[in-house]
Image: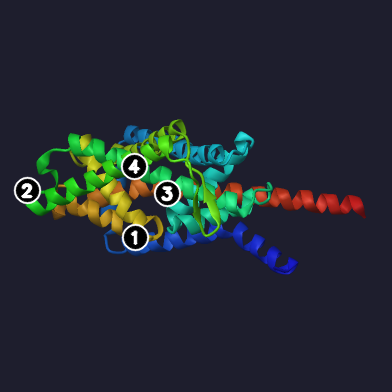
Amino acid sequence: MSGKTKRFFKKLVSWLGLFFFAFAAYMLYNQLSKYSWADIKNALLSIPAENLTYACIASFFGYVALSSYDYLALKYIGRKLAAWKWIFVGFIGFSVSNNAGHAIVSGGTVRYRFYTRWRFKATDILRMVTFSGFTYLFGCFLLIIIGYFLTPDHAFGEGSASKMTTLITTIVAVIGLVVYFWATLFYRKPLIIKEVEFDMPSFKLALEQTILGAADILLASLVLYSVLISFVDIPFDLFIGVFIIAQVLGVFSQVPGGLGVFEGLFLFIIPGGSDQMANLFGALLAYRIIYYVLPLILSSIVLLIYEWYLGYQHHKKLARKI
């Protein structure tokens, strides 16, 4: 790759934050255009300030948990990095990938941009991104298992098909976690995928990974629950089951931020007639603004400032040499 091409890709990546924000905003506009702005505005304004505060606090700690994905991934590959660096990259990476979809590509691109600057190999970055993906997956598995025993039988309908689907999903989650933890204790050979070696983490690291993934999802759910409870009287044990399904489907749909997929499932499952539709969508919109849009705006600003600072330092060094 020529020097000119490398410079082009560096500039491209540095502007990804704004691009993904604009794309996510466009997708959100498409969703909102189906509803009356007056109804949605009234729904947003009817959310108590106390609930919005709780939602913002949960969102803050949620992104702390998300940034910690990178900390565990660094432990996995055996590298150390200043705390501000992995917090910075984790926040930027997840605020972009949460909104853009295709988390491995969008979040991986951001990480490649920064970690290569700090002299990480491309294979190490790939191992980190893969490890973080499994952190989310095993966190989902843990919550699915817990949710199965907490969620009432009638939550997703009385049909045998829905009960069977729920049971099969839970069994898959149990098998996934059991096999993974068994492998961390007894399987020592590295997995080689396209010449990239993936070592099995220690049991302790796998446990930390699973707990962190579950904590991340729980904190994200608390953001929505804090605003949704203003309109719908729903027990948290029922809510978390719906949330996990909606979020996982949103992630696997690869639609930016799960837009439409997430809302559609929630509006279908949560009890309430058509008269509650605007209120429910208002709560979902508040959740998306607090957990998706605001972090993306903040990360875009931080990214621009950081890139400007690096450019300023570069020009300053060049001026000294002249």
Q: CA distance from mark 1 to mark 3?
A: 17 Å
Q: Secondary structure at mark 3?
A: helix
Locate the N terminus and report the quarter of the image it occupies: bottom right
Q: Secondary structure at mark 4?
A: helix
The answer to whether residue 107 is above or below residue 237 is below
Q: Which is more N-terminal, label 3 or label 2?
A: 2
In this figure, which residue is indicated by the disc labeled 4?
Answer: 179
Is 281 displayed left or right of 293 in the figure?
left
Q: CA distance from mark 3 to mark 4?
A: 33 Å
The colour scheme applied to this rendered structure is: rainbow
For discs 1 and 4, the disc positioned in front in the rendered view: 4
Three-letter residue code for mark 4? Val
In this figure, which residue is indicated by the disc labeled 1?
Answer: 253
Badge 4 vs badge 2, beta-carbon distance below 8 Å: no
For discs 4 and 2, the disc positioned in front in the rendered view: 4
Q: Secondary structure at mark 2?
A: loop
For the point 60% across and 50% down, the residue is 303
The answer to whether residue 3 is above or below residue 95 is below
Q: Secondary structure at mark 1?
A: helix
Q: Specify few, some or many for label 3: CA neighbours under 10 Å numbering under 14, 14-19, or 20 or more.
A: many
Q: CA distance from mark 1 to mark 4?
A: 26 Å
Q: Position of residue 67 (x, y in %)?
A: 50, 40
For the point 72% across and 50% down, the residue is 310
Is 215 displayed left or right of 123 in the figure?
left
- Residue 229 visible within the image: no
For discs 2 and 3, the disc positioned in front in the rendered view: 2
Three-letter residue code for mark 2? Glu
